[in-house]
Image (tube, coloured by chain):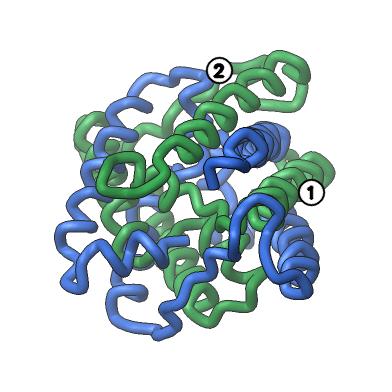
Chain colours: A blue, B green
Amino acid sequence: MSAMRIPYLATAALSGALFGAGLYVSQMVDPLKVLRFLDFTAIPGGDWDPSLAFVIGPAILVMFIAVRIGSSRPAPLFDSGFHEPEYRKVDVRLIGGAALFGIGWGMSGICPGPAISLVAFQPEGIWLFLAAMFAGSLAGSLVMPTGRSRLADVAP
Amino acid sequence: MESFTPVTAALGGSLIGLACAVLWLGNGRIAGISGIFGQLLPPAQSVLWRVVFLVALVGATALTAFAFPQLGAGGTEPVQLVAPPAGWSIPMPVWLIVAGLLTGLGTRIGNGCTSGHGVCGLARLSLRSLVAVAVFFSVAILTVTITGIV
């Protein structure tokens, strides 16, 4: 990869920048707006905010097209292959992990992307949340019985 | 429904999709933020691109907020984290620590979050991601309903 280092890092920077811009433009950086989507009790009263669905829909569509384009190529532009997750099994860890994350997300309205982009605005408590999220992630890597070798290759 | 913003939502969503597309077609990597964030420390290989990605993400958030303040929270009005539900009498720092721990632990054990499973995984037609998305959305909706945090 060393020969392609600059384009590789530039691609990572461009991707991160597009992601950050998208989180702000869509207002998904605002935890309250996310919680207003997750609050289905507001649907009968007409106060529900469906915006999040209008964010993730187009995002999936654009990425879907990119995946189609990628599948007709042997490799991405700046690496020797696509790092496709190889683990395909729906297991208890996937479901349990997603459920724990769901509780955290519902408590805060903050998923990992917005957690990072919120650093731009320095709201009170964001560093505490990030530190806890990092500690939780580390704890998870220790808990995983099959070890981190599987994780390092598979984590999306 | 006054807070419903479909146009900026779709525009921002397209940018997020484009971010995932660029990382996939350029570097063959999945733009899953929990994975990128969680593998910042050794022994993960190639930490540098992950740092570059995250710094660019924060920088671009600040830049777009500066350029288009009228688009929303963070521009014209400050963004705040949401306080714990009144009546639970739990101090905010404790609430945030528990939420952060669960988010970090859950996304690590479940191998992904809203971006890795929700955007990239569904776009790749991954069954694992479909199951994960169904679970974390359902549980999050249930959590909001039970806590009454909004």
Q: Which residue is mark 1?
A: B10
Cα distance, mark 2 to mark 1? 23 Å
Q: Is residue B91 left or right of residue A11?
A: left
Amino acid found under the numbered disc labelled 1: Ala
**B21 versus B83 height, above or below:** below
Q: Earlier in the sequence, mark 2 or mark 1?
A: 1
Q: Which residue occupies the foreground of this view, B42 or A23?
A: B42
Q: Do marks 2 and 1 both belong to one polypeptide chain?
A: yes
Amino acid found under the numbered disc labelled 2: Pro
Q: Tell me the residue at 28%/65% (across/down).
A: A149
SS for dot 2: loop
Q: Tell me the residue at 36%/48% (across/down).
A: B45
Chain of residue at mark 1: B
Q: Residue B29: x, y in percent?
A: 56, 56
**A122 versus B49 height, above or below:** above
* Number of marks drawn: 2
Residue B107 image-quadrant placement: bottom left
Q: Residue B112: x, y in percent?
A: 43, 60
Few, some or many C-alpha atoms within 10 Å of disc 2 (few <14, some 14-19, many ≥20)?
few
Q: Tell me the residue at 59%/22% (across/down).
A: B59
Residue B51 image-quadrant placement: top left
**B124 versus B55 height, above or below:** below
Say whether residue A50 is visible.
no
Q: Residue B64: x, y in percent?
A: 71, 23
Q: Is residue B91 left or right of residue A129?
A: left
The dot on residue B78 is 2
Q: Which residue occupies the foreground of this view, A99 or B54?
A: B54
Q: Which residue occupies the foreground of this view, B32 or B43?
A: B43
